[in-house]
């Protein structure tokens, strides 16, 4: 749970500038890729005809690769896209794209300084350094989001490893209640009550079937995971709330030995292996 909370807080605390750079919509990013592709084709013809030096083709190819990585980030790092909409492969692609953009900018800065005899005061170097700084912030943001996706995946795997056992064992509390949890009806009042009690939103880590659950083949529809320790004040309150309304839950107090999975409360019936 602590790791999950830290990832959530880090993601929210990152400078707004870094997040803003990841907010361009996918259609806009795809349009930039299309322009870069057309420019590469145009320059390729000019290089073939001898009107431009070969180095211009290399630069155009790098610009296209940069635009393609920006498109990846626009689909995965956009603040309007919840982390639970990503799976582990998408998160890995996001990190790789952010790192490549940092590396390209570092090369551009190095080349610029070499061409100016190592001067770091030129206007061009200043602009390049500012862009490098922003790209590094974007990478930091991507790392925080990756951690969040990994925590969701760890929770999903942990739940399945526990719920497949004949007996739940220590560290897991099961309450069947009425056996039904209707998210549309039951979740909003819970969120409102939690907000009123603790003056912060209910820390939902997985709402329904996430991209991670689909990738792992787990049916998490109609279930909600909440990143609270069942033995902490907010966890005790949550369990009491659910019991008083007959809502089923699993409270995971202890992680599997050797696992980074944190304590949490799973609202609804246990997640099953997907049959779809």
Image (tube, rainbow, N blue to C red):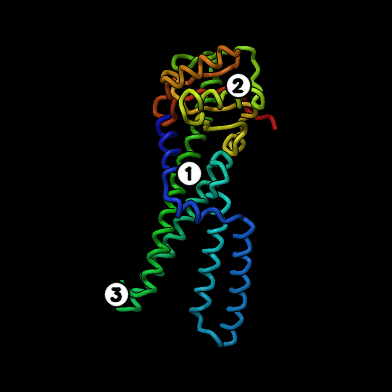
Query: Residue 11 at what x, y percent from top left?
Result: 45, 43
Specify the quadrant of the image occupied by residue 132. bottom left
Q: Residues within 10 Å of mark 1 (few under 14, many from 20)?
A: many
Q: Which residue is mark 3?
A: 118
Residue at position x 56%, y 87% from top?
Answer: 51
Residue at position x 50%, y 48% from top?
Answer: 92
Query: Residue 255 at what x, y percent from top left?
Result: 43, 24
Quarter of the figure that contains the N terminus? top left
- The residues tagged by marks 2 and 1 sit, at their Cα atoms, a distance apart of 26 Å
Using the image, determine if residue 59 lies above or below residue 4. below
Q: Residues within 10 Å of mark 3 (few under 14, many from 20)?
A: few
Specify the quadrant of the image occupied by residue 144. top left
The secondary structure type at the circle numbered 1 is: helix
Please identify the residue farthest to the bottom as the structure is shown: 50
With 3 as the anchor, is 274 left or right in this view?
right
- Can you tell which mark lies on residue 268? 2
Query: Residue 130 at what x, y percent from top left?
Result: 39, 64
- Which sits earlier in the primary sequence, circle 3 or circle 2? 3
Q: Which residue is mark 1?
A: 145
The secondary structure type at the circle numbered 2 is: loop
- Contact between marks 2 and 1 (CB within 8 A): the answer is no
With 10 as the anchor, is 62 left or right in this view?
right
Q: Nearer the viewer, residue 271 or 195?
A: 195
Query: Residue 124 at what x, y percent from top left?
Result: 39, 74
- Which sits earlier in the primary sequence, circle 3 or circle 1? 3
- The residues tagged by marks 3 and 2 sit, at their Cα atoms, a distance apart of 62 Å
Residue at position x 58%, y 32% from top?
Answer: 207
- Contact between marks 3 and 1 (CB within 8 A): the answer is no
- Which sits earlier in the primary sequence, circle 2 or circle 1? 1
Using the image, determine if residue 89 lies above or below residue 158. below
Specify the quadrant of the image occupied by residue 112. bottom left
């Amino acid at each position: 749970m602590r790791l999950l909370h830290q990832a959530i807080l880090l993601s929210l605390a990152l400078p707004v500038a870094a997040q803003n750079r990841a907010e361009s919509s996918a259609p806009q990013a795809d349009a930039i890729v299309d322009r870069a592709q057309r420019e590469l084709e145009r320059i390729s013809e000019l290089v073939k005809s001898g009107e431009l030096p070969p180095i211009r083709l290399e630069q155009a190819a790098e610009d296209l690769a940069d635009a393609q990585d920006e498109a990846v980030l626009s689909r995965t790092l956009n603040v309007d896209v919840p982390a639970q909409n990503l799976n582990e492969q998408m998160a890995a692609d996001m990190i790789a794209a952010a790192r490549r953009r940092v590396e390209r900018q570092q090369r551009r800065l190095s080349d610029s300084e070499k061409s100016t005899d190592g001067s770091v005061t030129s206007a061009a170097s200043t602009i390049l350094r500012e862009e490098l700084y922003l790209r590094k912030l974007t990478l930091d943001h991507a790392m925080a989001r990756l951690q969040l996706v990994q925590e969701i995946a760890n929770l999903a795997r942990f739940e399945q490893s526990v719920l497949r056992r004949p007996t739940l064992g220590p560290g897991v509390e099961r309450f069947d209640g009425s056996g039904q949890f209707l998210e549309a009806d039951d979740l909003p009042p819970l969120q409102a009550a939690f907000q009123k009690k603790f003056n912060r939103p209910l820390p939902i880590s997985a709402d329904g079937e996430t991209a991670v659950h689909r990738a792992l083949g787990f049916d998490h529809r109609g279930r909600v995971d909440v990143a609270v320790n069942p033995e902490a004040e907010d966890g005790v309150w949550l369990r009491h709330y659910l019991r008083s309304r007959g809502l089923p839950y699993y409270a995971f107090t202890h992680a599997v030995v050797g696992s980074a999975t944190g304590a949490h409360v799973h609202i609804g019936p246990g997640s099953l292996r997907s049959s779809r």
